[in-house]
Image (cartoon, rainbow, N blue to C red):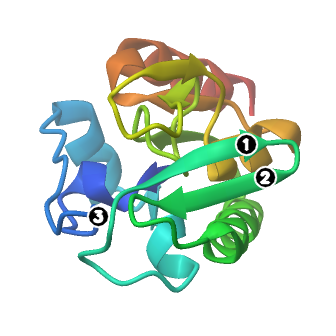
Amino acid sequence: MSKVLVSACLLGAKVRYDGRDNLLDHPVLKRWQQQGRLVTVCPETLGGLPTPRAPAETQSRFPILITTSAGEDVTPQFLSGAEQALELARQHDCCCALMKARSPSCGNQEIYDGTFSGNLVNAPGVAADELLRNGFPVFNEHQLEDLIQFVEQYSRAA
């Protein structure tokens, strides 16, 4: 039975920077959770950041630099969390990941541009990038139908 790595905030854990969640109320996710197929992860808390915490954005990708809105460098925590998220995906033999869109850790397609002004750039977050580079497809909450289709096809092929 294939497992899916999932951002904890999408399953209702109050681990967002502002202490809130992004609960996705979807019957398929509920079924998968009941079947023990979901592996929850919050790369930022795994990396040692508290909840709540200052918002953070990626200032540069090469070399990687992530800072809070107050200018504090939180790059080491983000990198540590990304490595631990990858390790969890490997340990649990996950087929893919469902991660929070636009998060500096979990965004799979776009993240905020580092100006704290709401502007987006086409780039993955640190943890999503680590997963993608290691062969794990990453979906966001706006791609649920694609995720479900992928997992069903993967499960049939396995």
State the residue at coordinates (52%, 40%).
114
Tag 3: amino acid: Tyr
Q: Residue at x 54, y 66 (%)?
A: 43
Q: Nearer the viewer, residue 23 or 71?
A: 71
Q: Give the residue at mark 2.
A: 64
Side (left or right) of 81 relative to 50: right
For the point 39% across and 58% down, the residue is 69
Which of label 2 and label 3 is nearer to you? 2
Q: Name which of mark 2 and mark 3 comes first in the sequence.
A: 3
Q: Circle 3 sits on which residue?
A: 17
Q: Tell me the distance, in whole angstroms, between the alpha carbons under discs 3 and 1.
A: 20 Å
Disc 3 or disc 1, which is closer to the eye? Answer: 1
Q: Give the x, y percent position of residue 112.
A: 47, 33
Task: Classify 10 Å Cα crowding around label 3: few (below 14), some (14-19), many (20 and above).
Answer: some
Q: CA distance from mark 2 to mark 3?
A: 20 Å
Residue 147 place in picture, x, y as percent: 48, 23
Instruction: Tell me the residue at 31%/74% (across/down).
Output: 53
Q: Secondary structure at mark 1?
A: strand
Which quadrant, please, contains the C terminus?
top right
Q: Could you say whether the residue bearing mark 3 is in a helix, strand or loop? A: loop
Viewer-nearest residue: 18 or 28:
18
